[in-house]
Image (spheres, rainbow, N blue to C red):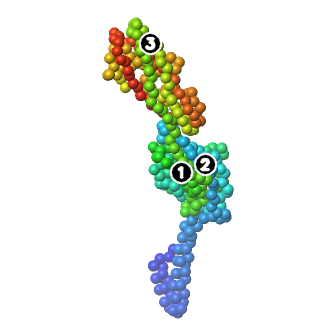
């Protein structure tokens, strides 16, 4: 039935001949009908509020490492740690109707809706809440525009994942305890808690400077262009490398002019008096070491702590008309850890 002011007037007009009590009854009936209609229209909105129909919120506690070492040169966006998966107890059954759902972070800035990476302050780290369904890993999205109807409970394997998203701050720490909550509407359904805090450090080795003494040689050893002296062995030391380094690469760059790039021969420095020769760099097997290029170092145990050496050799190499004198040069080496 549709009620309007016009209908009210017509009804009341037609009943003017009746008693005043009857008129009051008609007005009351009309008001009651209008109120009933209003209540019927409001009821679905009230029922849409997300609620537990049985049980209640659940917390899943994830065991995590106390220390995570991230190789210093790890690219941003790299997953640097994933905990084991822990299956939560069944959450309480929910009743929702197209309510927003998703994860709300408790330890950093909340990202925009439907994201899967949650920043952890200014640490250079973020986390992701992983879950497993039918053998496939997924990430819970951040709270916002995603909608859910609920109607059941949740009991899935969950894991905490740590991601490098920027330069790692000194003393970076992931707090223990509650880190995020999965929410339906305004209803906190599942909370992720860590057993302890995580100290995150940048993993690198100690690399002292190296001096290689090539010794004194006679010009007769350099009889023609391309001739070389005997080689001097030396090592680049990688000391006290922490666990967590998966790959090591090294690069050697000249600080003087390159005289012969194919054979990695560099010029003497400006203080030297010898002429017509340069310094050639070789690896431990006697092969030319490419200059200004990253080279993989494979003689180490990936992921394990330890100390290692990169074996190299150097020698004099004739490039032109030779003249005796002092013959010194220098190069820089850079180590990349991932």
Q: Secondary structure at mark 1?
A: strand
| Image-based side of 77 in relation to 64, left or right | left
Q: Are marks 3 and 1 in contact (CB under 8 Å)?
A: no
Check disc 2 and report the residue beneath it: 64
Alpha carbon distance from label 3 to label 2: 56 Å
**Horizontal and vertical percent for residue 5?**
45, 79
| Residue drawn at x 56%, y 44% as measured from the top left | 68
Please report whichever mark, 2 or 1, sits nearer to the chain's N-terminal start. Answer: 2
Please report whichever mark, 3 or 2, sits nearer to the chain's N-terminal start. Answer: 2
**Horizontal and vertical percent for residue 125?**
50, 47
Alpha carbon distance from label 2 to label 1: 10 Å
Q: Secondary structure at mark 2?
A: loop
Label 2 Cα crowd, 10 Å radius (few <14 / some 14-19 / many 20+):
many
Work out whether 331 lies above or below 3. Answer: above
Label 1 Cα crowd, 10 Å radius (few <14 / some 14-19 / many 20+):
many
Alpha carbon distance from label 3 to label 1: 56 Å
Check disc 3 and report the residue beneath it: 229
């Amino acid at each position: 039935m549709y009620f309007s002011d016009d209908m009210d007037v017509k009804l009341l007009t037609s009943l003017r001949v009746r008693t005043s009590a009857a008129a009051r009854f008609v007005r009351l009936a009309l008001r009651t009908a209008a109120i009933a209609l209003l209540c019927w229209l409001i009821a679905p909105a009230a029922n849409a509020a997300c609620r537990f129909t049985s049980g209640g919120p659940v917390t899943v506690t994830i065991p995590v490492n106390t220390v995570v070492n991230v190789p210093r040169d790890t690219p941003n966006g790299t997953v640097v740690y994933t905990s084991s998966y822990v299956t939560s107890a069944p959450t309480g059954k929910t009743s929702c109707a197209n309510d927003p759902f998703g994860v709300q972070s408790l330890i950093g800035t909340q990202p925009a809706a439907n994201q899967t990476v949650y920043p952890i302050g200014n640490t250079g780290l973020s986390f992701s809440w992983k879950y497993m369904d039918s053998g496939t890993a997924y990430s819970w999205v951040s709270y916002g525009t995603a909608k859910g109807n609920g109607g059941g409970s949740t009991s899935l394997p969950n894991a905490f994942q740590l991601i490098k998203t920027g330069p790692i701050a000194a003393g970076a720490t992931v707090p223990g305890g509650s880190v995020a909550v999965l929410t339906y509407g305004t209803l906190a359904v599942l909370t992720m808690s860590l057993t302890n805090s995580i100290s995150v450090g940048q993993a690198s080795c100690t690399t002292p400077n190296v001096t290689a003494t090539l010794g004194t040689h006679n010009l007769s050893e350099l009889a023609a262009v391309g001739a070389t002296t005997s080689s001097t062995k030396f090592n680049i030391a990688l000391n006290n490398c922490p666990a967590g380094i998966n790959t090591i690469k090294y690069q050697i760059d000249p600080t003087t002019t390159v005289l012969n790039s194919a054979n990695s021969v560099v010029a003497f420095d400006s203080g030297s008096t010898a002429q017509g020769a340069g310094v050639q760099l070789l690896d431990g097997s006697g092969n030319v070491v490419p200059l200004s290029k990253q080279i993989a170092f494979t003689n180490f145990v990936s992921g394990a702590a330890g100390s290692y050496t990169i074996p190299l050799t150097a020698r004099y190499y004739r490039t032109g008309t030779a003249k005796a004198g002092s013959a010194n040069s220098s190069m820089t080496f850079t180590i990349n850890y991932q």
